[in-house]
Image (cartoon, rainbow, N blue to C red):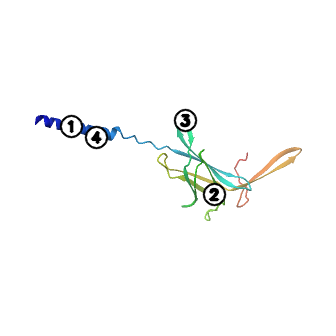
Amino acid sequence: MKTTFKTLKLGLILVGCLLIMARFGTASPQQKKLKLRMYVQYVKAMNDQSYFQIQAKVKGEKGYQPVADLKLTIYQVFGDSIALLEELKTELDGSAKYDLKKLVMNPSDTSGWFVYMITNEGTDQFNAGEKKIDFYDVNLVAEIVTKDSINFVSAILTKSRSDTPVSGERLK
């Protein structure tokens, strides 16, 4: 009877050890989610089109790498409310292009600012993120002027809604 009790006790200890090892030994460590970095640039070709050039990257072992097939959502912000515009995915090189077909002005905003937000919901690999971009819609008018046999470029940057010059902005 003494041997059976010792055997039972030893068996329980072994089963307990196996359960502990199974719980902690085989479980893979929780993979840390990577921080996604989004770069957004507003591009306007005069008298043609305007668009956002978006680049999604993540810092990996070999530096920054593009994120392909990432779902992005584009919103326009109007004060405290937002309007969903479109959902798109990044290309293999991590880039995406959103064509601004028509700039919709906030009726309560007289300053002329346009505010957009680009978001991603996050995945198993990446944290959710957002990038906000705000800008004026402007027009650039340039002409070549010849004075004393020397050619110059004369340029003026104006707000597109009011044709008033934009002061304090550098042209190059």
Report which quarter residue 75 is drawn in.
bottom right
**Disc 3: CA contacts within 10 A as few (<14), some (14-19) or many (>=20):** few
- Which mark sits nearer the N-terminus, 3 or 1? 1
Q: Helix, strand or loop at disc 2?
A: strand
State how far apart marks 2 and 3 are (Cα): 39 Å
Judged by depth in the image, the label closer to the viewer, 3 or 1, is 1
Residue 113 disc label: 2
**Disc 4: CA contacts within 10 A as few (<14), some (14-19) or many (>=20):** few
Amino acid carrying label 2: it is Trp
Q: Nearer the viewer, residue 14 or 83?
A: 14
Residue corresponding to mark 4: 19
Judged by depth in the image, the label closer to the viewer, 1 or 2, is 1
- Which mark sits nearer the N-terminus, 2 or 3? 3
Who's the residue at 33% across and 39% down the image?
24
Q: Helix, strand or loop at disc 4?
A: helix
Is 133 rendered above or below residue 32?
A: below
